[in-house]
Image: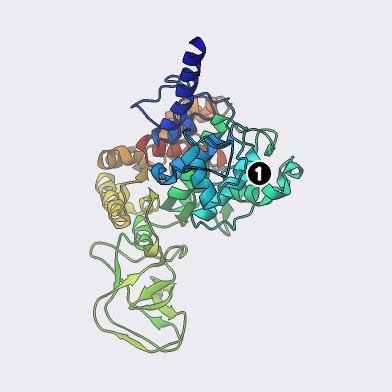
Amino acid sequence: MKKIVSLLLALLMLLSVFCFTVSAEEPFDDVKENHWYYRAVEYCFEKSLMSGMSPTAFGPSLKVNREMFVKTLANMEGIDEESYKVTESPFKDVRLDMWYAPAVEWARQTGIVAGLSEDTFGVGKPITREQIARLLRGYAEYKGKDVSASADLSAFADDDKINDWALDGFKYVVAKGIFKGNAKNELNPRGNATRAELATILKAVRAYENNKLVAWGDSLTQGIIEGFHDISKSPYPEHTAELLNVPAYNFGIGGDTAEAIAIRQGGIAIYVDSLTIPADKTPVAIDIRAEEGYTTKNINENGDKGLNPVTIDGIKGNIIGDWEEGYKFQRLEAGEEKVITSETRIVTDGMSFDYSNAILVICSGANNTKEQAWHDDPEAHLQYLCQIQKKMVDYAGTDNFVIIGLPKVRFMAKIPKYNYILEEYWGEHYLDVNEYMMSEQAFIDNGLEMKGRDKKDVAEGYIPRTFLDALQQLHPNQMGYDMISKLLSEKIYELGYLK
Protein backbone atom coordinates (compact mmCIF):
# COMPACT_ATOMS: atom_id res chain seq x y z
CA MET A 1 0.00 0.00 0.00
CA LYS A 2 2.85 2.39 0.88
CA LYS A 3 4.41 1.68 -2.49
CA ILE A 4 1.20 2.57 -4.30
CA VAL A 5 0.81 5.82 -2.32
CA SER A 6 4.44 6.74 -3.04
CA LEU A 7 3.98 6.07 -6.74
CA LEU A 8 0.82 8.17 -6.83
CA LEU A 9 2.57 11.04 -5.08
CA ALA A 10 5.50 10.85 -7.49
CA LEU A 11 3.11 10.84 -10.43
CA LEU A 12 1.23 13.87 -9.09
CA MET A 13 4.49 15.74 -8.65
CA LEU A 14 5.53 14.94 -12.18
CA LEU A 15 2.15 15.96 -13.56
CA SER A 16 2.41 19.26 -11.73
CA VAL A 17 5.29 20.17 -14.02
CA PHE A 18 2.94 20.26 -16.97
CA CYS A 19 -0.47 21.10 -15.53
CA PHE A 20 0.61 24.76 -15.70
CA THR A 21 -1.70 25.89 -12.93
CA VAL A 22 -0.43 29.18 -11.55
CA SER A 23 -1.20 31.39 -8.59
CA ALA A 24 -0.91 35.15 -8.18
CA GLU A 25 2.62 35.03 -6.77
CA GLU A 26 5.60 32.85 -7.51
CA PRO A 27 5.66 30.27 -4.70
CA PHE A 28 9.06 28.61 -5.06
CA ASP A 29 11.32 28.51 -2.03
CA ASP A 30 14.27 27.32 -4.14
CA VAL A 31 14.20 30.26 -6.57
CA LYS A 32 15.62 33.50 -5.16
CA GLU A 33 16.04 36.93 -6.74
CA ASN A 34 19.82 36.64 -6.74
CA HIS A 35 19.77 33.38 -8.73
CA TRP A 36 20.78 33.73 -12.38
CA TYR A 37 17.64 31.91 -13.50
CA TYR A 38 15.20 33.93 -11.37
CA ARG A 39 13.81 36.07 -14.22
CA ALA A 40 13.45 33.05 -16.49
CA VAL A 41 11.57 30.98 -13.92
CA GLU A 42 9.38 33.97 -13.09
CA TYR A 43 8.59 34.44 -16.78
CA CYS A 44 7.82 30.78 -17.46
CA PHE A 45 5.65 30.58 -14.34
CA GLU A 46 3.68 33.72 -15.22
CA LYS A 47 3.25 32.64 -18.85
CA SER A 48 2.15 29.14 -17.78
CA LEU A 49 5.04 27.44 -19.54
CA MET A 50 6.35 25.66 -16.46
CA SER A 51 5.10 24.99 -12.95
CA GLY A 52 6.76 23.43 -9.93
CA MET A 53 7.82 19.95 -8.94
CA SER A 54 5.76 20.63 -5.81
CA PRO A 55 3.67 23.55 -4.58
CA THR A 56 6.78 25.24 -3.14
CA ALA A 57 9.72 23.78 -5.11
CA PHE A 58 10.66 24.45 -8.73
CA GLY A 59 13.58 22.02 -8.81
CA PRO A 60 16.02 24.20 -10.81
CA SER A 61 18.87 21.67 -10.76
CA LEU A 62 16.80 18.64 -11.81
CA LYS A 63 17.58 17.18 -15.23
CA VAL A 64 15.09 17.58 -18.08
CA ASN A 65 14.17 14.47 -20.04
CA ARG A 66 13.01 14.20 -23.65
CA GLU A 67 9.28 14.01 -22.96
CA MET A 68 9.43 16.98 -20.60
CA PHE A 69 11.05 19.14 -23.25
CA VAL A 70 8.63 18.08 -25.97
CA LYS A 71 5.73 18.82 -23.62
CA THR A 72 6.94 22.37 -23.03
CA LEU A 73 7.25 22.91 -26.79
CA ALA A 74 3.70 21.64 -27.27
CA ASN A 75 2.49 23.90 -24.50
CA MET A 76 4.31 26.87 -26.02
CA GLU A 77 2.55 26.08 -29.28
CA GLY A 78 -0.79 25.77 -27.49
CA ILE A 79 -1.78 22.51 -29.18
CA ASP A 80 -5.20 20.91 -28.77
CA GLU A 81 -4.19 17.73 -26.98
CA GLU A 82 -7.43 15.96 -27.90
CA SER A 83 -6.38 16.14 -31.54
CA TYR A 84 -3.20 14.19 -30.78
CA LYS A 85 -4.60 11.42 -28.63
CA VAL A 86 -4.05 8.22 -30.61
CA THR A 87 -4.76 4.56 -30.09
CA GLU A 88 -1.29 3.45 -31.11
CA SER A 89 2.15 4.95 -31.51
CA PRO A 90 5.19 3.73 -33.45
CA PHE A 91 7.19 4.32 -30.26
CA LYS A 92 6.91 1.28 -28.01
CA ASP A 93 8.15 3.17 -24.96
CA VAL A 94 5.41 5.84 -25.17
CA ARG A 95 2.49 5.02 -22.90
CA LEU A 96 -0.62 6.49 -24.51
CA ASP A 97 -2.28 7.16 -21.16
CA MET A 98 0.57 9.36 -19.92
CA TRP A 99 0.60 13.19 -19.77
CA TYR A 100 3.30 13.46 -22.44
CA ALA A 101 1.72 11.20 -25.10
CA PRO A 102 -0.21 13.89 -27.07
CA ALA A 103 2.86 16.14 -27.12
CA VAL A 104 5.08 13.34 -28.42
CA GLU A 105 2.52 12.52 -31.12
CA TRP A 106 2.30 16.20 -32.12
CA ALA A 107 6.07 16.45 -32.34
CA ARG A 108 6.24 13.23 -34.36
CA GLN A 109 3.53 14.28 -36.83
CA THR A 110 5.05 17.71 -37.38
CA GLY A 111 8.54 16.29 -37.80
CA ILE A 112 9.99 18.45 -35.04
CA VAL A 113 11.20 15.43 -33.07
CA ALA A 114 12.23 12.00 -34.19
CA GLY A 115 12.75 9.01 -31.96
CA LEU A 116 16.06 7.58 -30.93
CA SER A 117 15.11 4.80 -33.32
CA GLU A 118 12.06 3.89 -35.41
CA ASP A 119 10.29 2.32 -32.46
CA THR A 120 11.89 4.12 -29.49
CA PHE A 121 11.25 7.71 -28.48
CA GLY A 122 13.59 7.69 -25.48
CA VAL A 123 11.14 8.26 -22.65
CA GLY A 124 12.99 9.11 -19.44
CA LYS A 125 16.27 9.83 -21.23
CA PRO A 126 17.89 13.14 -20.18
CA ILE A 127 18.00 15.62 -23.05
CA THR A 128 21.30 17.24 -24.00
CA ARG A 129 21.88 20.85 -24.91
CA GLU A 130 22.78 19.96 -28.48
CA GLN A 131 19.56 17.97 -28.84
CA ILE A 132 17.65 21.01 -27.60
CA ALA A 133 19.50 23.24 -30.07
CA ARG A 134 18.54 20.99 -32.95
CA LEU A 135 14.92 20.72 -31.80
CA LEU A 136 14.58 24.48 -31.39
CA ARG A 137 15.76 25.06 -34.94
CA GLY A 138 13.28 22.43 -36.10
CA TYR A 139 10.52 24.11 -34.13
CA ALA A 140 11.36 27.50 -35.66
CA GLU A 141 11.32 25.95 -39.13
CA TYR A 142 7.93 24.39 -38.38
CA LYS A 143 6.68 27.86 -37.35
CA GLY A 144 7.78 29.28 -40.69
CA LYS A 145 10.56 31.36 -39.17
CA ASP A 146 13.72 32.29 -41.01
CA VAL A 147 16.33 29.81 -39.77
CA SER A 148 19.20 31.11 -41.88
CA ALA A 149 20.82 32.91 -38.93
CA SER A 150 24.19 31.30 -38.34
CA ALA A 151 26.73 32.21 -35.67
CA ASP A 152 30.46 31.50 -35.76
CA LEU A 153 30.98 28.93 -33.02
CA SER A 154 34.78 29.02 -33.14
CA ALA A 155 34.83 31.62 -30.35
CA PHE A 156 33.67 28.96 -27.87
CA ALA A 157 36.21 26.74 -26.12
CA ASP A 158 34.34 23.48 -26.80
CA ASP A 159 32.96 24.03 -30.31
CA ASP A 160 34.84 20.92 -31.46
CA LYS A 161 32.66 18.78 -29.16
CA ILE A 162 29.44 19.54 -31.03
CA ASN A 163 28.23 16.63 -33.11
CA ASP A 164 27.87 17.33 -36.82
CA TRP A 165 24.11 16.74 -36.74
CA ALA A 166 23.74 19.49 -34.13
CA LEU A 167 25.92 22.16 -35.77
CA ASP A 168 23.14 23.94 -37.66
CA GLY A 169 21.01 23.93 -34.54
CA PHE A 170 23.74 25.43 -32.40
CA LYS A 171 24.63 28.05 -35.00
CA TYR A 172 20.97 29.07 -35.07
CA VAL A 173 20.33 29.27 -31.30
CA VAL A 174 23.59 31.14 -30.67
CA ALA A 175 22.83 33.63 -33.47
CA LYS A 176 19.41 34.26 -31.94
CA GLY A 177 20.84 34.77 -28.47
CA ILE A 178 18.96 31.74 -27.11
CA PHE A 179 22.16 29.95 -26.07
CA LYS A 180 25.17 31.73 -24.60
CA GLY A 181 28.46 30.44 -23.33
CA ASN A 182 29.03 29.73 -19.63
CA ALA A 183 31.68 31.33 -17.41
CA LYS A 184 34.31 29.15 -19.08
CA ASN A 185 33.15 30.25 -22.53
CA GLU A 186 31.77 26.78 -23.20
CA LEU A 187 28.51 25.74 -24.85
CA ASN A 188 28.54 22.37 -23.08
CA PRO A 189 26.77 20.66 -26.02
CA ARG A 190 26.61 17.17 -24.52
CA GLY A 191 25.69 18.26 -21.03
CA ASN A 192 22.22 17.45 -19.75
CA ALA A 193 19.94 20.47 -19.48
CA THR A 194 18.49 21.37 -16.07
CA ARG A 195 15.06 22.82 -15.38
CA ALA A 196 16.67 26.21 -14.70
CA GLU A 197 18.36 26.08 -18.10
CA LEU A 198 15.11 25.00 -19.74
CA ALA A 199 13.28 27.97 -18.22
CA THR A 200 16.00 30.27 -19.54
CA ILE A 201 15.75 28.72 -23.00
CA LEU A 202 11.95 28.95 -23.16
CA LYS A 203 11.98 32.57 -22.07
CA ALA A 204 14.63 33.39 -24.68
CA VAL A 205 12.67 31.68 -27.47
CA ARG A 206 9.38 33.38 -26.59
CA ALA A 207 10.94 36.78 -25.99
CA TYR A 208 12.81 36.82 -29.29
CA GLU A 209 9.78 35.62 -31.26
CA ASN A 210 7.17 37.84 -29.62
CA ASN A 211 8.90 41.13 -28.74
CA LYS A 212 11.10 43.83 -30.16
CA LEU A 213 12.57 47.00 -28.67
CA VAL A 214 12.45 50.18 -30.75
CA ALA A 215 14.19 53.29 -29.41
CA TRP A 216 13.83 56.84 -30.73
CA GLY A 217 16.03 59.62 -29.47
CA ASP A 218 19.12 61.74 -29.86
CA SER A 219 22.81 61.00 -29.27
CA LEU A 220 22.15 59.36 -25.90
CA THR A 221 20.09 56.76 -27.76
CA GLN A 222 22.39 56.58 -30.76
CA GLY A 223 25.42 56.01 -28.55
CA ILE A 224 27.88 56.51 -31.36
CA ILE A 225 28.40 59.82 -33.11
CA GLU A 226 30.02 58.78 -36.37
CA GLY A 227 32.97 60.87 -37.42
CA PHE A 228 33.24 62.60 -34.06
CA HIS A 229 33.54 60.44 -31.02
CA ASP A 230 32.58 56.86 -30.27
CA ILE A 231 30.73 57.20 -26.99
CA SER A 232 29.81 53.56 -26.52
CA LYS A 233 30.24 50.19 -28.16
CA SER A 234 26.93 49.05 -26.70
CA PRO A 235 24.34 51.84 -26.32
CA TYR A 236 21.33 51.26 -24.08
CA PRO A 237 18.91 50.05 -26.84
CA GLU A 238 21.24 47.26 -27.94
CA HIS A 239 22.32 46.30 -24.43
CA THR A 240 18.77 46.34 -23.07
CA ALA A 241 17.64 44.17 -25.97
CA GLU A 242 20.47 41.76 -25.18
CA LEU A 243 19.36 41.56 -21.54
CA LEU A 244 15.78 40.90 -22.63
CA ASN A 245 16.81 38.71 -25.57
CA VAL A 246 14.76 40.65 -28.10
CA PRO A 247 15.69 42.31 -31.42
CA ALA A 248 16.74 45.99 -31.13
CA TYR A 249 15.97 48.89 -33.47
CA ASN A 250 17.96 52.02 -32.67
CA PHE A 251 16.64 55.20 -34.32
CA GLY A 252 18.84 57.61 -32.39
CA ILE A 253 20.53 60.53 -34.12
CA GLY A 254 23.00 62.82 -32.35
CA GLY A 255 21.91 66.43 -32.10
CA ASP A 256 18.27 65.85 -33.04
CA THR A 257 15.61 67.98 -31.39
CA ALA A 258 12.42 66.46 -30.03
CA GLU A 259 10.47 67.79 -33.03
CA ALA A 260 12.89 66.28 -35.55
CA ILE A 261 12.73 62.91 -33.78
CA ALA A 262 8.93 62.97 -33.83
CA ILE A 263 8.89 63.92 -37.52
CA ARG A 264 11.14 61.02 -38.44
CA GLN A 265 8.98 58.64 -36.38
CA GLY A 266 5.66 59.95 -37.71
CA GLY A 267 4.27 61.57 -34.56
CA ILE A 268 4.51 65.03 -36.12
CA ALA A 269 3.21 65.21 -39.68
CA ILE A 270 5.01 67.07 -42.47
CA TYR A 271 3.40 68.17 -45.72
CA VAL A 272 4.01 69.59 -49.14
CA ASP A 273 1.28 71.80 -50.62
CA SER A 274 2.49 72.15 -54.19
CA LEU A 275 5.30 70.37 -56.02
CA THR A 276 6.19 69.20 -59.48
CA ILE A 277 8.37 66.11 -59.38
CA PRO A 278 10.22 65.75 -62.68
CA ALA A 279 10.28 62.49 -64.61
CA ASP A 280 14.05 62.14 -64.19
CA LYS A 281 16.08 62.09 -60.97
CA THR A 282 16.94 65.78 -60.98
CA PRO A 283 16.62 67.25 -57.44
CA VAL A 284 13.78 69.75 -57.15
CA ALA A 285 13.25 72.42 -54.49
CA ILE A 286 10.58 71.48 -51.97
CA ASP A 287 8.79 73.59 -49.38
CA ILE A 288 8.20 71.28 -46.41
CA ARG A 289 5.65 72.36 -43.82
CA ALA A 290 5.18 70.76 -40.43
CA GLU A 291 1.77 70.58 -38.79
CA GLU A 292 0.80 73.68 -36.88
CA GLY A 293 3.01 74.52 -33.92
CA TYR A 294 6.13 72.66 -35.07
CA THR A 295 9.19 73.29 -37.21
CA THR A 296 11.07 71.36 -39.90
CA LYS A 297 14.29 73.18 -39.04
CA ASN A 298 16.32 70.15 -37.94
CA ILE A 299 14.77 67.21 -39.80
CA ASN A 300 17.94 66.01 -41.51
CA GLU A 301 20.59 68.34 -40.17
CA ASN A 302 22.32 65.56 -38.23
CA GLY A 303 21.34 62.45 -40.19
CA ASP A 304 18.39 60.92 -41.97
CA LYS A 305 17.89 57.59 -40.20
CA GLY A 306 14.14 57.04 -40.13
CA LEU A 307 13.56 59.96 -42.51
CA ASN A 308 14.79 58.79 -45.91
CA PRO A 309 13.65 57.40 -48.17
CA VAL A 310 10.40 59.35 -47.99
CA THR A 311 7.36 58.82 -50.17
CA ILE A 312 5.39 61.69 -51.71
CA ASP A 313 2.17 60.75 -53.45
CA GLY A 314 3.53 57.30 -54.27
CA ILE A 315 6.97 58.45 -55.44
CA LYS A 316 9.91 57.37 -53.33
CA GLY A 317 12.97 59.58 -52.92
CA ASN A 318 15.25 61.40 -50.51
CA ILE A 319 15.00 64.79 -48.85
CA ILE A 320 18.38 66.49 -49.22
CA GLY A 321 19.72 69.93 -48.31
CA ASP A 322 18.94 71.82 -45.12
CA TRP A 323 16.57 74.36 -43.63
CA GLU A 324 18.83 77.37 -44.22
CA GLU A 325 19.82 76.60 -47.81
CA GLY A 326 16.50 75.02 -48.68
CA TYR A 327 15.32 71.41 -48.94
CA LYS A 328 15.22 69.41 -52.16
CA PHE A 329 13.52 66.18 -53.16
CA GLN A 330 15.30 63.66 -55.37
CA ARG A 331 13.33 60.67 -56.58
CA LEU A 332 15.09 57.31 -56.49
CA GLU A 333 13.90 56.05 -59.87
CA ALA A 334 12.94 57.87 -63.04
CA GLY A 335 9.30 57.68 -64.09
CA GLU A 336 6.40 59.90 -65.02
CA GLU A 337 6.24 63.54 -63.97
CA LYS A 338 4.03 64.11 -60.92
CA VAL A 339 2.24 67.40 -60.26
CA ILE A 340 1.00 67.96 -56.69
CA THR A 341 -1.42 70.85 -56.14
CA SER A 342 -3.01 70.11 -52.76
CA GLU A 343 -1.84 69.28 -49.25
CA THR A 344 -0.01 65.93 -49.34
CA ARG A 345 1.59 64.26 -46.36
CA ILE A 346 5.20 63.20 -46.71
CA VAL A 347 5.57 59.60 -45.53
CA THR A 348 8.89 59.06 -43.78
CA ASP A 349 10.74 55.76 -43.70
CA GLY A 350 10.16 55.54 -39.92
CA MET A 351 6.41 55.70 -40.43
CA SER A 352 6.50 52.26 -42.03
CA PHE A 353 7.83 50.62 -38.84
CA ASP A 354 5.56 47.85 -37.57
CA TYR A 355 4.91 48.39 -33.86
CA SER A 356 3.17 45.05 -33.41
CA ASN A 357 4.68 43.51 -30.26
CA ALA A 358 7.05 46.46 -29.96
CA ILE A 359 8.28 48.02 -26.74
CA LEU A 360 8.67 51.71 -27.59
CA VAL A 361 11.38 53.71 -25.79
CA ILE A 362 11.66 57.48 -26.19
CA CYS A 363 14.58 59.54 -24.93
CA SER A 364 14.34 63.06 -26.33
CA GLY A 365 14.55 66.71 -25.37
CA ALA A 366 18.22 67.15 -24.52
CA ASN A 367 19.01 69.18 -27.64
CA ASN A 368 16.02 71.48 -27.17
CA THR A 369 17.70 72.67 -23.98
CA LYS A 370 20.21 74.56 -26.15
CA GLU A 371 17.38 76.94 -27.07
CA GLN A 372 17.11 79.95 -24.78
CA ALA A 373 13.33 79.52 -24.53
CA TRP A 374 13.81 76.26 -22.64
CA HIS A 375 15.91 78.09 -20.06
CA ASP A 376 13.55 81.05 -19.83
CA ASP A 377 10.49 78.91 -19.06
CA PRO A 378 11.57 75.30 -18.51
CA GLU A 379 8.28 74.21 -16.96
CA ALA A 380 6.25 75.25 -20.01
CA HIS A 381 8.72 73.66 -22.36
CA LEU A 382 8.83 70.38 -20.46
CA GLN A 383 5.05 70.31 -20.90
CA TYR A 384 5.69 70.96 -24.60
CA LEU A 385 8.10 68.02 -24.67
CA CYS A 386 5.42 65.79 -23.12
CA GLN A 387 3.02 66.77 -25.91
CA ILE A 388 5.59 65.87 -28.58
CA GLN A 389 6.31 62.52 -26.95
CA LYS A 390 2.57 61.82 -26.66
CA LYS A 391 2.19 62.35 -30.39
CA MET A 392 4.89 59.71 -30.92
CA VAL A 393 3.20 57.26 -28.55
CA ASP A 394 -0.16 57.86 -30.22
CA TYR A 395 1.31 57.31 -33.66
CA ALA A 396 2.93 54.04 -32.58
CA GLY A 397 -0.42 52.92 -31.20
CA THR A 398 1.11 50.87 -28.40
CA ASP A 399 0.54 50.81 -24.65
CA ASN A 400 3.98 49.27 -24.15
CA PHE A 401 6.31 52.24 -23.90
CA VAL A 402 8.87 53.86 -21.62
CA ILE A 403 9.84 57.54 -21.49
CA ILE A 404 13.40 58.11 -20.23
CA GLY A 405 13.90 61.33 -18.29
CA LEU A 406 16.61 63.89 -19.02
CA PRO A 407 19.98 62.99 -17.44
CA LYS A 408 21.38 65.42 -14.90
CA VAL A 409 24.58 66.58 -16.59
CA ARG A 410 26.19 70.04 -16.61
CA PHE A 411 25.37 70.56 -20.29
CA MET A 412 21.70 70.90 -19.40
CA ALA A 413 22.25 72.83 -16.18
CA LYS A 414 18.93 73.27 -14.37
CA ILE A 415 16.58 71.71 -16.97
CA PRO A 416 16.52 68.12 -15.58
CA LYS A 417 15.35 69.56 -12.26
CA TYR A 418 11.96 69.74 -13.95
CA ASN A 419 11.87 66.02 -14.74
CA TYR A 420 9.03 65.82 -12.23
CA ILE A 421 6.81 67.21 -15.00
CA LEU A 422 7.65 64.20 -17.18
CA GLU A 423 7.08 61.90 -14.22
CA GLU A 424 3.69 63.42 -13.42
CA TYR A 425 2.63 63.31 -17.07
CA TRP A 426 3.75 59.77 -17.87
CA GLY A 427 3.24 58.06 -14.52
CA GLU A 428 4.40 54.43 -14.52
CA HIS A 429 5.81 54.79 -18.04
CA TYR A 430 8.43 57.28 -16.83
CA LEU A 431 11.95 56.07 -16.07
CA ASP A 432 14.30 58.13 -13.93
CA VAL A 433 17.95 57.18 -14.43
CA ASN A 434 19.40 59.87 -12.19
CA GLU A 435 18.53 58.65 -8.71
CA TYR A 436 20.38 55.36 -9.15
CA MET A 437 23.32 56.78 -11.12
CA MET A 438 23.83 59.40 -8.39
CA SER A 439 23.70 56.88 -5.54
CA GLU A 440 26.40 55.13 -3.58
CA GLN A 441 24.68 51.87 -4.45
CA ALA A 442 25.61 52.38 -8.11
CA PHE A 443 29.28 52.53 -7.09
CA ILE A 444 28.96 49.46 -4.86
CA ASP A 445 27.25 47.49 -7.64
CA ASN A 446 30.19 48.28 -9.92
CA GLY A 447 32.83 47.43 -7.33
CA LEU A 448 33.79 51.09 -6.86
CA GLU A 449 33.90 53.65 -4.10
CA MET A 450 32.36 57.10 -4.39
CA LYS A 451 35.24 59.51 -3.83
CA GLY A 452 35.80 63.27 -3.64
CA ARG A 453 35.13 64.38 -7.21
CA ASP A 454 32.10 62.16 -7.58
CA LYS A 455 30.71 63.23 -4.21
CA LYS A 456 31.07 66.85 -5.31
CA ASP A 457 29.22 66.12 -8.57
CA VAL A 458 26.34 64.50 -6.67
CA ALA A 459 26.24 67.34 -4.11
CA GLU A 460 25.90 69.79 -7.00
CA GLY A 461 23.07 67.75 -8.48
CA TYR A 462 24.87 65.99 -11.36
CA ILE A 463 25.61 62.42 -12.41
CA PRO A 464 29.14 61.52 -11.21
CA ARG A 465 31.86 61.87 -13.83
CA THR A 466 32.94 58.29 -13.20
CA PHE A 467 29.83 57.23 -15.13
CA LEU A 468 30.19 59.80 -17.94
CA ASP A 469 32.19 59.95 -21.13
CA ALA A 470 35.57 61.44 -20.21
CA LEU A 471 35.88 63.66 -23.29
CA GLN A 472 32.50 65.38 -23.15
CA GLN A 473 31.11 64.60 -19.68
CA LEU A 474 27.78 64.79 -21.44
CA HIS A 475 26.87 61.21 -22.34
CA PRO A 476 27.24 58.09 -20.21
CA ASN A 477 30.35 56.00 -20.71
CA GLN A 478 29.92 52.25 -21.20
CA MET A 479 29.50 51.76 -17.45
CA GLY A 480 26.79 54.40 -17.49
CA TYR A 481 25.07 52.85 -20.49
CA ASP A 482 25.10 49.48 -18.77
CA MET A 483 23.33 51.08 -15.80
CA ILE A 484 20.64 52.61 -18.01
CA SER A 485 20.19 49.25 -19.73
CA LYS A 486 19.76 47.55 -16.37
CA LEU A 487 17.23 50.13 -15.19
CA LEU A 488 15.30 49.98 -18.47
CA SER A 489 15.15 46.19 -18.59
CA GLU A 490 13.93 46.12 -14.98
CA LYS A 491 11.28 48.72 -15.86
CA ILE A 492 10.09 46.63 -18.79
CA TYR A 493 9.86 43.57 -16.53
CA GLU A 494 8.04 45.60 -13.90
CA LEU A 495 5.47 46.83 -16.42
CA GLY A 496 4.96 43.30 -17.74
CA TYR A 497 5.68 44.15 -21.36
CA LEU A 498 7.43 40.91 -22.33
CA LYS A 499 5.02 38.60 -24.12
Q: Is residue 187 above or below residue 312?
A: above
On the picture, is 151 further left or further right than 205?
A: right
Residue toward you, 183 or 461: 183
| Residue at which label 1 appears | 117
On the picture, is 252 further left or further right than 116?
A: left
Q: Quadrant of residue 267?
A: bottom left
Give the color scheme: rainbow, by chain, secondary structure or one colour.
Answer: rainbow
Q: Which residue shows up at 39% across the image and 43% down it?
A: 82
| Residue 162 point in image, percent of width and height | 72, 44
Q: Which residue shows up at 25% across the image and 83% down it?
A: 341
Spot the residue most to the front.
87
Secondary-structure class at tag 1: loop
Crowdedness of circle 1 by 10 Å Cα count: few (<14), some, many (20+)?
few
| Residue 485 point in image, percent of width and height | 48, 40
Q: Which residue shows up at 44% across the image and 42% down it?
A: 85
Q: Which residue shows up at 45% across the image and 65% down it?
A: 304
Residue toward you, 419 or 72: 72
Q: Quadrant of residue 407?
A: top left
Spot the residue most to the top.
2
Q: Is residue 288 above or below residue 494?
A: below
Residue toward you, 53 or 198: 53
Q: Quadrant of residue 499?
A: top left
Amino acid marked by disc 1: Ser
The mark total stands at 1
Q: Is residue 169 visible?
A: yes
Residue toward you, 192 or 102: 102
| Residue 332 point in image, percent of width and height | 47, 79
| Residue 305 point in image, percent of width and height | 46, 63
Q: Is residue 450 visible?
A: no
Q: Is residue 234 above or below residue 141?
A: above
